[in-house]
Image: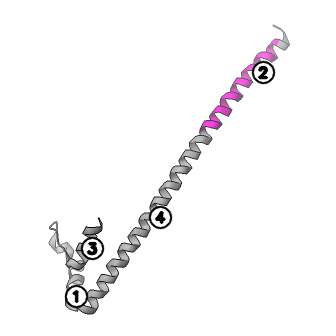
Amino acid sequence: MLFIDFLRIEDEKLSAQLRERRNEIGRLTQEAGNIESEKESASHEIRALEAQRRLLESHNNQRRRYLQEREPDVHKSLEWLEQNRHLFQNRPIFGPMLLEVGFLLIQ
């Protein structure tokens, strides 16, 4: 075997390895793009859910203020219930309907 033949064989091996690496880079680049797209989609969904949560909290806070202003005894009972919910263990305990119904309707 001549030295030139040896170089040609080595060149072919290196060319094949180079093609494999380029193919791998292309595949990984595409995979990274897919992951980035999924990340953007998830981020958008998170922002939408956070906005929805803020809206619900805003409505809930408005209702709580209403109770505090118009029905102070009910508001006081609600605060007691929230502080002592652990006393009821696994039994479902509901607060004032004004607060509970809003969440049930939205869900």
User: According to the image, label 3 marks what residue?
Assistant: 102
* Colouring scheme, one of rainbow, by chain, secondary structure, one colour: one colour
Question: Regarding mark 3 in the picture, which secondary structure is present there?
Answer: helix
Question: Regarding mark 1 in the picture, which secondary structure is present there?
Answer: helix
- Disc 3 marks a residue whose amino acid type is Gly
User: According to the image, label 4 marks what residue?
Assistant: 47
Q: Classify residue 18 as left or right of residue 102.
A: right
Q: Classify residue 22 as left or right of residue 73.
A: right
Tell which tag, 4 or 2, sits nearer the viewer: 4
- Disc 2 marks a residue whose amino acid type is Asp
Assign the magenta stretch its main secondary structure: helix
Image height of 53 relative to 7, above or below: below
Question: Regarding mark 2 in the picture, which secondary structure is present there?
Answer: helix
Tell which tag, 4 or 1, sits nearer the viewer: 4
Tell which tag, 3 or 4, sits nearer the viewer: 3
Earlier residue among tags 3 and 2: 2
Earlier residue among tags 3 and 4: 4
